[in-house]
Image (spheres, rainbow, N blue to C red):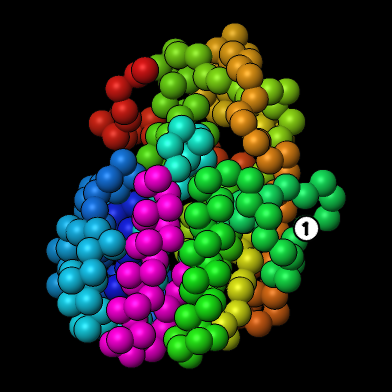
Amino acid sequence: MKLLVTGGAGFIGSHFARSILHGEYPDIDPEVVTVLDCLSWGGDVRNLEAVRDDPRLRFVLGDIRDEQLVGELMREHDTVAHLAAETHVDRSVSGAAPFIDTNVGGTRVLLDAAVTHGVERFLHVSTDEVYGSIDEGAWTEEQPLAPTSPYSAAKAGSDLLALAFHRTHGLPVVVTRCSNNYGPHQFPEKLIPLFVTRLLQGLDVPLYGDGGNIRDWLHVSDHCRGLALALTGGRAGEIYHIGGGRELTNRELVERLLKGCGVSWDQVTAVPDRKGHDRRYALDHSKITQECGYQPQVDFDLGLADTIDWYSSHRSRWPAPR
């Protein structure tokens, strides 16, 4: 396998690349793993330090919207894991253009090149946010899309493009949708790393609304194992959910973060709720369990403690306080 990983210097992409090169997925034995990343806000080459001396790793600084570069790279690879995306909902509310340009436009560039060069497998990585909000139960893969933010709308558009390229061109696409990821190496903009790095500095943290929004939490190692299973065992043209099986309200999560950081509720400030804030996400991941053997393995409380420890011991990775 000659594997191209887009966004491979980011949080999830780098974990996927590292795990592959460490031999953690027995069905994936690559000749080369090429990481394509433009090193925007979430990408960091330090995320690849553990495998930088592996001769199979190649890093390319570039943008998935660059048609010439993408075409050259696609010609050299038979498999694509597409993780590059603009992902932060708050930033998409402030300005939608980069999300449309990258998530939709960049995905189109990759898909066109994959068809031109006869790629054998195209894994498109997406999110549960494309479904909107659900009050009870859990979404299956047949749930209609109902995104509510510019970010999730852009991801929904890219999902539909990928599936359309399968139906129109026969491109062997597999789409995955995951719940909220956490773990080491995540850029301190999302909730868990943002709160941990601020709490450990004695700074206040913002809790939206009443703190009752519910998310399912998925450790990045479980997610990447699910990606590997979908890449090697998923059926072309299908969608697979990768869930963590641990639902918490934001308030319950913050309670655990405060305890793990050894601080009190005095550092929590209530702020007005975000525009269009979905109340609850929940994925039914029985399809990938039945077809590919996926099950989440990381205990949430242990995974969260390990994550807090990682940020505590990697303070050089923290952003400046704001």
The residue positioned 48% from the left and 90% from the top of the image is: 170
**Residue at point 58%, 44% (across, down):** 149
Crowding near the residue tagged with mark 1, few <14, some 14–19, many ≥20 C-alpha atoms within 10 Å = some
> In the image, what residue type sits under mark 1?
Ala
Instruction: Using the rendered image of the protein, determine whether residue 73 is visible from the camera's viewpoint.
Output: no
Over which residues does the magenta segment extend? 97-124
Residue corresponding to mark 1: 138
Q: Position of residue 320 (x, y in %)?
A: 30, 22
Query: Left or right: where does residue 15 sit relative to residue 233?
Result: left
Decide whether residue 100 is among the magenta residues.
yes
Quadrant, the N terminus = bottom left
Residue depicted at 61% across the width and 22% down the height: 207
Q: Residue furthest top?
A: 266
Whole-percent x, y for residue 16 in the image:
39, 64
**Does the image show residue 261?**
yes
Q: Above or below — where is 116 with respect to 93?
A: below
Quadrant for residue 244, please give it: bottom right
Predominant SS of the magenta segment: helix
- Residue at image x 20%, y 59%? 62
| Location of residue 263 by image quarter | top right
Question: What secondary structure is marked by label 1?
Answer: loop
Q: Is residue 35 magenta?
A: no
Quarter of the rendering occupied by the C terminus: top left
In the image, 159 versus 54, the foreground residue is: 159
Q: Position of residue 257 (x, y in %)?
A: 57, 29
